[in-house]
């Protein structure tokens, strides 16, 4: 029988009380073990970092990946991770980029806690059990790779997006049953990667309909202390109206070791550069988002940041890592 490592990382799933508060993992894990179907061979683990998912960063996910990679050395090949829903898509995409198809992993969470207010029994109405059972069942059936399971659906992890704040049907993405080009290579996480990730700064600017002069002011403010990656979410297929001064600021940002990535605020679909308004992108030193989702773009910037020491190298190799 295949053994599954079930890793608990916090979130609504493990909350109790009113208002909801996380139950300490030492108390929660024995209760979690009680609801696991007896026909499955599952061992429960606490993640290295357990916190509200809105506070999670690359450091937390890299520690989780390192834990999974260590468990792989102990002959675990099947992993189910319980995580909060706020940054579930970011965690999913990061796991996918770093684990590739080296194992079978499904990440899940819930909109309602597993346990009642007192924390002594399962809650009368909850999606936690259904999501957990779905993940445990599907992780043994699906091909190697990373997936997200939620509300009777399983998606390719890199393609997911949270689309509703409170509904049970909270996530969308490309279904696991459909073919999808996703990461296949494993990236072994070392301690120095985790230290380095703490310095990663990705700034995302969703453009609003403002005069170009206002965008120039914003870019000048950013130039004073630039991030390593500046994501500009344009309109439609990534369209941004620029002028010479804006293009000069893009060049200045590049020389300050900041890579600009042009993306779109539209949720689905690839960027399309057939419009004259976008022709500047061919000559400006900007990157085009070629990822499956906004969270996948974050995961890719993290991986490029850790893999290549300079912004020139990250720029040069960007499109070699499209999946």
Image: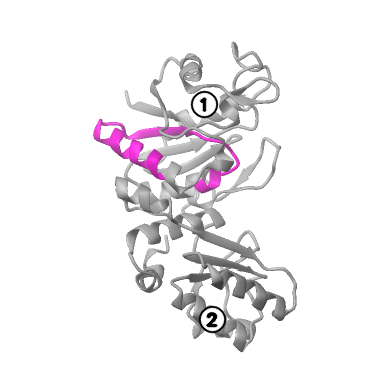
Q: How dense is the environment of label 1, judged by Cα within 10 Å: few (below 14), some, or many (20 and up)? A: some
Confirm whether residue 258 shows in the render: yes
Q: Which residue is drawn at 58% across and 42% down?
A: 54
254 vs 77, nearest the viewer: 254
Residue nearest the observer in this picture, 305 or 182 = 305
Residue 161 percent location from the top left of the image: 59, 49
For the residues carrying marks 1 and 2, which lies nearer the camera in this image?
2
Which residue has dot 2 on it?
Answer: 281
Q: Quadrant of the C terminus?
A: bottom left
Q: How many marks?
A: 2
- Image position of 192 with respect to 71: above or below: below
Which residue range is magenta in the image? Answer: 62-90
Query: x and y percent of residue 315 in the render?
Result: 40, 72
The residue beneath circle 1 is 133
- At x 59% / y 11%, what residue is drawn? 120
Q: Distance between the residues labelled 1 and 2?
A: 47 Å
Residue under the point 44% across and 42% down: 60
Say what secondary structure mark 1 lies in.
helix
Of the image marks 1 and 2, the number of the one nearer the N terminus:
1
Q: In the visual, does 317 lie left or right of 106?
A: left
* Residue 15, image quadrant: top right
Instruction: Please tell me whether mark 2 sits on a helix, a strand or a loop.
Output: helix
* Residue at 38% from the left image edge and 28% from the top image edge: 5
The residue at the far bottom in this view is: 244
Which sits in the foreground, 305 or 88? 305
| Residue 108 falls within the magenta-colored stretch | no
Q: Against 164, is 201 above or below?
A: below
- Residue 121 percent coordinates (x, y): 60, 12
71 to 209, vertically: above or below: above
Q: Position of residue 19 (x, y in %)?
A: 70, 25
């Amino acid at each position: 029988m295949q053994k599954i490592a079930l890793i608990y990382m916090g979130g609504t799933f493990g909350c109790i009380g009113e208002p909801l508060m996380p139950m300490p993992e030492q108390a929660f894990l024995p209760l979690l073990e009680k609801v696991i179907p007896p026909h499955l061979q599952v061992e429960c683990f606490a993640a290295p970092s357990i916190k509200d998912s809105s506070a999670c960063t690359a450091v937390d996910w890299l520690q989780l990946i390192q834990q999974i990679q260590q468990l792989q050395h102990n002959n675990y090949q099947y992993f189910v991770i319980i995580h909060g829903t706020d940054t579930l898509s970011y965690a999913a995409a990061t796991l996918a980029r770093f684990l590739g198809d080296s194992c079978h992993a499904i990440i899940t969470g819930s909109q309602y806690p597993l346990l009642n207010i007192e924390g002594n029994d399962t809650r009368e109405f909850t999606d936690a059990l259904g999501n957990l059972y779905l993940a445990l069942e599907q992780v043994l059936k699906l091909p190697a790779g990373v997936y997200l399971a939620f509300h009777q659906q399983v998606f390719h992890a890199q393609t997911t997006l949270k689309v509703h704040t409170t509904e049970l049907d909270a996530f969308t993405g490309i279904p696991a049953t459909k073919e999808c080009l996703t990461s296949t290579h494993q990236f072994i996480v070392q301690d120095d990667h985790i230290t380095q990730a703490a310095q990663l700064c990705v700034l995302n600017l969703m453009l609003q309909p403002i005069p170009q002069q206002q965008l120039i002011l914003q870019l000048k403010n950013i130039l004073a202390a630039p991030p390593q990656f500046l994501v500009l979410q344009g309109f439609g297929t990534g369209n941004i109206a620029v002028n010479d001064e804006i293009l000069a600021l893009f060049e200045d940002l590049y020389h300050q070791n900041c890579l600009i990535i042009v993306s779109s605020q539209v949720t689905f679909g690839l960027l399309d550069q057939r419009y004259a308004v976008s022709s500047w992108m061919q000559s400006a030193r900007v990157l085009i988002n070629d990822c499956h989702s906004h969270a996948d773009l974050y995961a890719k910037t993290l991986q490029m940041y850790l893999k290549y020491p300079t912004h020139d190298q990250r720029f040069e190799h960007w499109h070699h890592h499209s999946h």
